[in-house]
């Protein structure tokens, strides 16, 4: 398939050949991806949604399959809908995963009401948005996820006085271990999470230290120094299981309760009962838990006898299964009609073969399934995401691709996470999707160790270890203080016996309620080059103004020996080795890669609950590449500047409506580009929405390039939800382009049409149906 052209893209096909492909990283901000191109691995941009329930406070974690940066949200107080702006840290990776303009996660029910829709919209405006609709007005807030591949949204009862911060426990890459009893509410989910025990046997000295910590904690509780007691007890519980462990955990729950934090006390008592359901002290702990649940206003569990025959609520929650996912089909059509007139040339006798072209005539079918099951020993998750593309033109035939196919397991007692299969990772030196395995051992709350290995996947049709590519690596991570994570890694990638890359580096993440920072340094010790140096940060002010920025230096394409194949008549490095030495291949690889440098700064400011403005400026520079091996070097772009301004209005005339107006300008070496983009999203009913959009573009040449181009692109999208499970949408539009190039005049008209459906499904032991019966209605989402 071919990507449909957007504003300025006609000219770019001719002019961009003179510069490095890396300029697409920034150019993507000025065009809208419409469909998947022919060969990249496409996947859903959205990964999943997780829910954390508490009394009057619900938190949602929206996961992505690539790294994202939170860039603001509106409204910032109370409302029945929410728009959260995000920006991909790696834009090219994000574009390769955006098959369509919109994606959605299944609707769900919470203790505060129904979340009617969760949509990811990449069309229109400066940044993609995650859009939420609720069935009632709620106090809402949003923030960056700790792992930088997610955002967190908090929903609260407007009458709630206690804070409901958008913080999700266990969401970070250094907090992904799922304990047998995760906290279900409270003021500080990070602090209330059950403590991970070290494996092994406690020494006599360690046992004495735990006993002393219990005595000191009891004394601190009597004196009202609850924080001191909690700190001592959590440290004591990190010791391997011993004769004092149960007493320490029960006392920790008591300390939380006396400190005025019943939600954290609940988490500790539930963890105790999950670990020791038939303990002689379990009845007393259950009685304490009943008192806590009563204080929280929740129904208490039934008491359980010492023989453990009747499951309590605490143990039931860790034994079960669920299956969820979606099935979708979309038809995509894109035709173009072209006419060229040049009075300085004689008329052409033969018809223009490009006068009418069908760029896309495809049926795109997708299946995304996630299944999870757990018990007192481990939690497991299986995920499959695949697509099938039928090209009616017959050029590409059938393209069947698997974007994700993995099993993810967490073993509680060993603090070990294992993921096996086709998966995506953007940390510890791994460059996206691969077939292989990752193992993480969390030695303590402060230190973890990881191993990763497999074969990189560049095309969705790739088989594992195609072309002899494989990699292996190790890493160690530290969490010295809450919110800060530092990892160090080493990774080697080979193509058979040839070194493809040999990297050492570090990832740094910091997250606080107001500040998020992500940084990466990747250095290739084989090529003696910095492959990636990235700093990305956002700062949220008290009035919910978000200031964000990034500095990025990277090789484009990423420096590997495989890059030496660019422009060469060889399919593999093995073929190339027949005519060139290894040293020559390494030299060609360096010559084929350019330095991509960029810096950006932006601010998003909410004026009130209805209006938000965003300003953004980006600088880029792509270096030239050298001539070698019979391949001509590419010219550099020089300094290029991109300026953007956007205004978003929500809930202006109806709950859930949205107005987006954006103005963008690109100051580039060969051309200047101006784009005016306006879009309206209006709910005609609770089930039917219309979204008209209009884009106007003006492009002019620089440095003696006699080029002028005008573009008008109107479109309209209709979105209909038949039920909470069945969703239909259709979009139709056109793109008119008038280009003056010297004495030649060219007119292009493109027609595009997209229509399809999505079915969301869910089942668990409490549902009133068993898959694959599609007609039943689930009572629990």
Image (tube, rainbow, N blue to C red):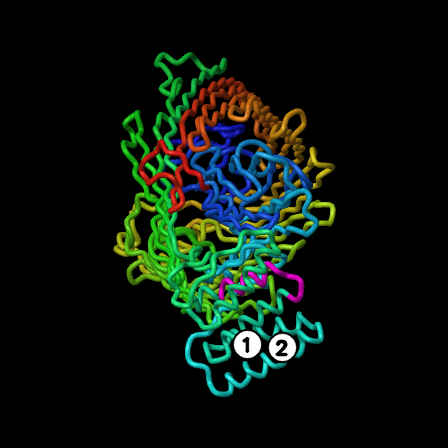
Q: Nearer the viewer, residue 127 or 263?
A: 263
- In this figure, which residue is indicated by the disc labeled 2? 217
Q: In this rendering, is residue 247 above or below 644? A: below
Mark 1 in CB contact with mark 2 (< 8 angstroms): yes
Q: Position of residue 427 (x, y in %)?
A: 47, 57
Answer left or right for 319 relative to 114. Answer: left
Q: Position of residue 201 (x, y in %)?
A: 42, 81
The image quarter containing residue 395 is top left
Q: Position of residue 556 (x, y in %)?
A: 48, 49
Which residue corresponds to the image point at 70% horizontal and 49% vertical from the top-left?
161
Which residue corresponds to the image point at 63% horizontal and 77% vertical from the top-left?
218
Which residue corresponds to the image point at 60% horizontal and 50% vertical from the top-left?
55
Which residue corresponds to the image point at 65% horizontal and 36% vertical from the top-left?
79
- In this figure, which residue is indicated by the disc labeled 1? 236
Mark 1–mark 2 Cα distance, whole angstroms, equals 10 Å
Magenta-highlighted residues? 258-272
Taking the image as drawn, is residue 590 in sight?
no
């Amino acid at each position: 398939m071919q990507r449909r052209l957007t504003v300025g893209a006609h000219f770019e096909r001719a002019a961009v050949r003179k510069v490095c492909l890396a300029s697409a990283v920034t150019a993507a901000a000025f065009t809208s991806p419409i469909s998947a191109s022919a060969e990249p691995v496409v996947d859903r941009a959205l990964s999943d949604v997780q829910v954390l329930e508490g009394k009057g406070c619900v938190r949602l974690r929206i996961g992505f399959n690539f790294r994202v940066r939170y860039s603001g949200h509106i409204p910032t107080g109370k409302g029945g809908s929410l728009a959260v702006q995000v920006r991909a840290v790696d834009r090219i990776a994000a574009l390769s995963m955006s098959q369509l303009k919109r994606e959605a996660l299944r609707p769900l029910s919470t203790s505060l009401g129904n979340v009617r829709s969760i949509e990811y919209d990449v069309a229109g405006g400066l940044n993609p948005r995650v859009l939420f609709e609720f069935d009632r007005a709620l106090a809402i807030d949003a923030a960056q996820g700790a792992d930088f591949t997610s955002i967190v949204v908090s929903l609260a009862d407007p009458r709630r006085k206690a804070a409901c911060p958008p913080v999700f426990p266990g969401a970070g890459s250094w907090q992904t271990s799922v304990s047998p009893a995760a906290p279900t509410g409270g003021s500080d989910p990070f602090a209330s999470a059950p403590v991970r025990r070290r494996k092994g046997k406690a020494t006599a000295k360690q046992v004495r230290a735990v006993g002393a910590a219990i005595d000191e904690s009891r004394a601190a509780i009597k004196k009202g120094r609850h924080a001191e007691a909690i700190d001592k007890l959590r440290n004591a519980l990190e010791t391997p299981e011993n004769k004092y462990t149960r007493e320490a955990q029960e006392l920790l729950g008591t300390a939380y309760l006396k400190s005025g934090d019943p939600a954290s006390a609940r988490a500790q008592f539930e963890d105790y009962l999950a670990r020791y359901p038939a303990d002689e002290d379990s009845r007393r702990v259950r009685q304490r838990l009943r008192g806590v649940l009563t204080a929280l206003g929740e129904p208490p569990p039934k008491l359980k006898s010492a023989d453990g025959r009747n499951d309590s609520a605490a143990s039931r929650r860790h034994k079960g299964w669920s299956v969820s996912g979606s099935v979708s089909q979309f038809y995509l059509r894109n035709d173009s009609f072209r006419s060229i007139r040049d009075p300085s040339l004689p008329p052409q006798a033969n018809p223009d073969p490009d006068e009418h072209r069908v760029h896309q005539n495809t049926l795109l079918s997708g299946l995304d399934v996630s299944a999870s099951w757990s018990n007192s020993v481990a939690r497991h998750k299986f995920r499959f995401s695949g697509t099938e593309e039928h090209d009616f033109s017959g050029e590409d035939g059938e393209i069947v691709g698997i974007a994700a196919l993995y099993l993810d397991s967490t073993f509680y007692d060993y603090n070990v996470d294992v993921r096996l299969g086709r998966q995506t990772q953007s940390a510890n030196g791994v460059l996206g999707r691969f077939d292989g395995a990752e193992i993480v051992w969390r030695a303590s709350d402060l230190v973890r160790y990881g191993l990763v290995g497999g074969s990189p996947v560049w095309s969705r049709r790739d088989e594992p270890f195609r072309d002899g590519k494989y990699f292996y690596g190790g890493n160690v991570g530290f969490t010295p203080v809450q919110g800060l994570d530092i990892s160090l890694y080493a990774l080697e990638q080979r193509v058979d016996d040839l070194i493809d890359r040999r990297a050492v580096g570090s990832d740094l993440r910091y997250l606080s309620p107001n500040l998020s920072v992500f940084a990466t340094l990747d250095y290739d010790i084989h090529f003696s080059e910095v492959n990636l140096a990235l700093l990305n940060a956002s700062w949220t002010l008290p009035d919910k103004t978000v200031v964000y920025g990034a500095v990025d230096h990277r090789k484009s394409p990423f420096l590997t020996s495989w890059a030496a194949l660019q422009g060469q008549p060889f399919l593999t490095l093995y073929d190339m080795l027949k005519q060139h030495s290894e040293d020559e291949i390494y030299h060609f690889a360096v010559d084929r890669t350019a330095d991509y440098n960029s810096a950006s700064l932006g601010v998003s400011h909410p004026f009130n609950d209805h209006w938000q403005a965003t300003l953004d400026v980006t600088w880029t520079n792509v270096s030239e590449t050298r001539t070698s091996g019979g391949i001509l070097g590419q010219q550099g772009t020089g300094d290029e500047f991109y300026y953007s301004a956007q205004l978003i209005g929500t809930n202006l005339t109806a709950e859930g409506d949205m107005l987006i107006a954006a103005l963008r300008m690109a100051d580039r070496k060969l051309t200047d580009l101006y784009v005016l983009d306006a879009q309206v999203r209006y709910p005609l009913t609770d089930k039917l929405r219309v979204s008209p959009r209009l884009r106007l573009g003006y492009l002019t040449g620089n440095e003696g390039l006699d080029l002028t181009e005008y573009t008008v692109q109107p479109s309209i999208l209709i979105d209909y939800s038949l039920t909470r499970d069945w969703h239909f949408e259709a979009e139709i539009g056109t793109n008119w382009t008038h280009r003056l190039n010297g004495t030649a005049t060219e007119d292009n008209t493109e027609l595009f049409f997209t229509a399809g459906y999505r079915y969301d499904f869910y089942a668990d032991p409490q549902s009133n149906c068993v898959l694959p019966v599609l007609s039943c209605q689930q009572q629990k989402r």
